Amino acid sequence: MSTTSTRQQVTPELRKWIVEQAQAGHGAESVLKAMVASGWAEDVAVDAMEETLRGHLEAEAQAKGLPPAVPVPEPTLDESPLYLDGGDRKVCVLQTVVDPRIVVFGNLLSDEECEQLIQFAKPRLARSLTVQTKTGGEEVNEDRTSNGMFFQRAENELVRRIEQRIARLVNWPEENGEGLQILQYGPGAEYKPHYDYFDPNEPGTPTILRRGGQRVGTLVMYLGEPEKGGGTVFPDVHLEVAPKRGNAVFFSYARAHPSTRTLHGGAPVLQGEKWIATKWLRERRFE
Ligand code: PD2
Ligand code: ZN
């Protein structure tokens, strides 16, 4: 007899009961215990709870007018590994936050890779533009006082290698990535707190989304260290990530909404120069 035919069936009554328990404030452990005590197999009970509560929260979110949640890139962090396999490089997991999902990586790039990216970018730097959400075009933005440039995806061997590493690290197709952006911040330069997803209420957003859907994840890689300042800040969770060369911060957002608490910014550089490479990840292939 196959396991599927003997697996206990999760009924609508059971789903209703699970939601009621959660609403009454009972914790996952005690609900699970009660289910097992009344004869449910533990694996069936865990799956039923996860699926039911996820579905319930999603229905509630959509009823409140939030955009639907979509799949997001996610490093493989079950069992809290200290290292992840980047294919050609062993990457450290330095810090993780579950909600919002934020992961700080160490040793993502070598010093040589950081230096090479900076040298390739230097002759092509211009005052940073941001996407103009009113029209879908680009504009100089006073909130972003850095200089920047974009590489094409897989523009050269170095960029391709780094893109492959990132794709493997966060389990997301290379083709869904925008081209790497390099930014240079001098003393006083900053990037004021913002969300990286495109605001669904702005008239230019449908045009932007035609190139691969929403942004669902960001990886900011630190290429050059300032002496002071220049951290990446997440005001909603009071987190500041130090801009250490070779390290990176990853975060994801399943819906284009502030409820993701992914507000973030580049704090002003106080001394020295900060260089970063940003990889934004889209829902689908970025054209
Ligand atoms: O430079 C940063 O730390 C930073 C902060 C916020 C970069 C970005 N956003 C970005 O490139 O989106
Ligand atoms: Zn950003």
Image (cartoon, helix red, strand yellow):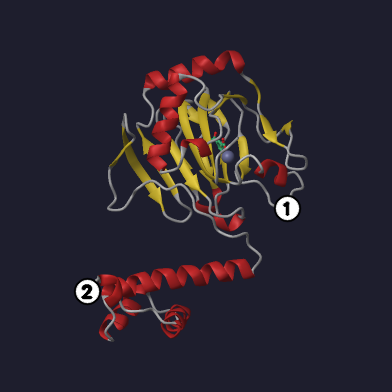
Q: Which quarter is ligand 1 in?
A: top right
Amino acid marked by disc 1: Asn
Badge 1, how many Cα within 10 Å: few under 14, some, many 20+?
A: few
Q: Which mark is residue 201?
A: 1
Q: Earlier in the sequence, mark 2 or mark 1?
A: 2
Q: Pinpoint residue 114: horizontal percent, then vertical percent.
A: 43, 22
Q: Quadrant of residue 43?
A: bottom left
Q: Pinpoint residue 265: horizontal percent, then vertical percent.
A: 57, 40
Q: Residue placed at 74% from the left, 48% from the top?
A: 202
**Mark 2 Cβ and ligand 2 under 8 Å apart:** no
Q: Nearer the viewer, residue 61 or 221?
A: 61
Question: Mark 2 touching mark 1, by CB under 8 A?
Answer: no
Tell me the element at label 1.
loop
Report whether 238 appears left or right of 31.
right
Q: CA distance from mark 2 to mark 1?
A: 53 Å
Q: Residue placed at 27% from the left, 80% from the top?
A: 36
Q: Which mark is residue 162?
A: none
| Residue at the spot of label 2 | 1
For discs 2 and 1, the disc positioned in front in the rendered view? 2
Q: Pinpoint residue 66: horizontal percent, then vertical percent.
A: 63, 62
* Image quadrant where one finds the N terminus: bottom left
Q: Residue placed at 27% from the left, 43% from the top?
A: 82
Q: Is residue 110 above or below residue 191?
A: above
